[in-house]
Image (cartoon, rainbow, N blue to C red):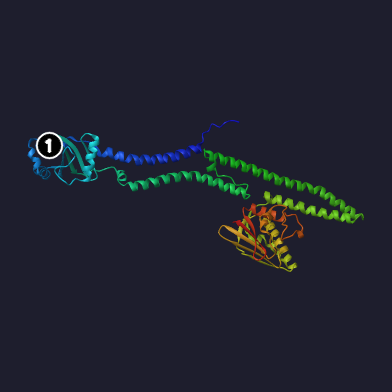
Amino acid sequence: MAVSTVPNRLFIKLLLGFWLCSSLIIALVGLLPLLQQSHDRAPLPPHLEKVLSTIAKRIQENPALLESDFLRRWERHRDMEGKPLRVYLVNSQGQVVNTHRVSRGVRSFMLMADEEKQPISHQFKDELVFGPYQFNLGAETYSLYGRLPDNHPRPWFFFFAENKLLTLSLAIFLSGLLCGLLAWHLGKALNSLKKSANALAEGDLSHRVDKSTTQRKDEIGQLAKAFNSMADSIESMMNNQQRLMGDISHELRTPLTRLQLSLALARKKGQQTAETDRIGYEAEQLEKLISELLELSRVKLSTNETKVHLGLAESLSQVLDDAEFEAEQQGKSITIDIDEEIELAHFPKSLSRAIENLLRNAIRYAASDIQLQASATADQVKITIKDDGPGIDAAELDAIFKPFYRPDSARQRESGGWGLGLAITEAAITAHKGKIKAENRIPTGLKVTITLPK
C-alpha cells in the first residue's frame, strides 16, 4: 500500500494556531517591560552631567557648603529650561544627606544606577531622574543625583506596561478570540459534515456536503470528499435495489397473468373445485402483493410524478370522500379539519396514497372516532391523524414503518396484508423531505403526525 507523503495539515493548523497564539501573547507581554526600559533609560546626557559636575566643583572648592543650605538655594535659583531642579547628595553609605524627603522614583533610580555601574538617566511617568556624578571630598566619596519634573510623550503601548491587570485581561481576551476563530474555522466544516450525516441517516440520500467544505485542502476536506463518495455509492445502491424490486415484481406479473388465465379457462370448462378456488385466491393475493411492491418502488424512486403547488384539501378530496364513506359503512365517525388555504409543493398521487393508508388503518382499528387535522406555519404543514383504537406497544412505534413489518401486539394481523402500507406512507413522506412519527394516545388510541416542508 502506498504511503501518503501529504503532511498532516490539520495537525499543522492546530499546532501553529495554538502555538503562535500563545507565543505571540507571551512575547507581547514579556517585551513590553523591555521596550519601556530601552525607551525610558539612556546614558547620562552631557548637559545634565555638566549641571551635576558644576555643583560638585562648588562643593569641592568650599566644603563648608555641605553644612549650609547651598543645595536648597541652588534648587530655588537654578532651573533647566524653566523646570525646577532637585539635587540629592548621597554619601558612601548610600544615605541622602541633604534631605529626608526622597521620592520612590529616586530610590528606584538609585538601585538602577547601581546595577548599571555608570551614570544614566531614566524617564519616569512624570519626572526625569539622572546621575550619579561621583566626586571625592577628603576621604569621603559622594554621589550627586538630579531630578526634573518632566513628562515626555511616550508610545501608546506603554500604557499596558503600567496597567498590568488590564494587560492580562486583554491578553486573555485576544488569546480567546484567536482560539475562537480557529475553533470556528474547524467547527463550521465539522458541523456541515454532521448535518449531511444526519440527513443521510434520516433517509435523504441526495444530501451532500457543501463545496466550501470539500474544497478545503486539509483532512476535513478529504473526509468530506470521502463522505460524498460514500453517499453516492449508497444512493446508487439503494436506487438499484428499488429498481431491482420493481423489475422483479413486474416480471412476476407475466407468469401470474398466465396462471390466472389458465384458472379462468379451467372454470369455463367446468373444472372448478375447492383446489382451483384456493389457487385463484392465492393468485389474487400475489397480485395485490406485487402491486404493493411496485408502488413502494415507484414512491421511493419518485418516478413518473412531478411536484405541483396545489391546495392540500384539493389533492386529498377523493381520499377524504372515500374515507368518510368507509367510516360510515362501519358505523364510525370521522372528523376532518383542513384549512382550504393550505397550499404546498408536493407529489399529489404519493401524498394521497400516504394519507389513504393512514386513514384506512385508523378506520380499521378505531373504536368509534377518527380525526384528521391539518395546520400550516410559514415554512411547514402539519397533518395529524388520530384514532381511539387499542394503540401499539411503545417498542413497536418506530418499526411499523418498515417494509413487511406487522405489529403482533394490540393491533393484530386479523386484517391480513403484508405490512407494506405504512412503508409506502413513510417512503412518500421521505420523498417530500418530510417526517412522520407515531405515538400512543392517552388513554387509548394512536396518533400519527406528518410534517411537510412548504
Secondary structure beneath dot 1 equals: helix
The answer to which image quadrant residue 409 occupies is bottom right
Q: Position of residue 204 (x, y in %)?
A: 62, 49
Q: Position of residue 412 (x, y in %)?
A: 74, 60
Q: Position of residue 292 (x, y in %)?
A: 74, 53
Q: Can residue 318 be seen in the rendering of this structure?
A: no
Q: Residues within 10 Å of mark 1 (few under 14, many from 20)?
A: many
Q: Quadrant of the C terminus?
A: bottom right
Question: Residue 302 or 87: which is nearer the viewer?
Answer: 87
Total numbered circles: 1
Q: Quadrant of the N terminus?
A: top right
Question: Residue 275 or 2: which is nearer the viewer?
Answer: 2
Q: Is residue 444 above or below residue 99?
A: below
Question: Given the current orientation, which residue lies at the most extreme right position?
Answer: 270
Q: Position of residue 400 (x, y in %)?
A: 69, 55
Q: What residue would you read off at disc 1?
A: 56
- Give the amino acid type for the residue marked by disc 1 in the picture: Ala
Q: In the visual, does 41 lie left or right of 15? A: left
Question: Residue 97 or 371: which is nearer the viewer?
Answer: 97
Q: Can residue 361 be seen in the rendering of this structure?
A: yes
Q: Residue at x 62, y 42 (%)?
A: 230
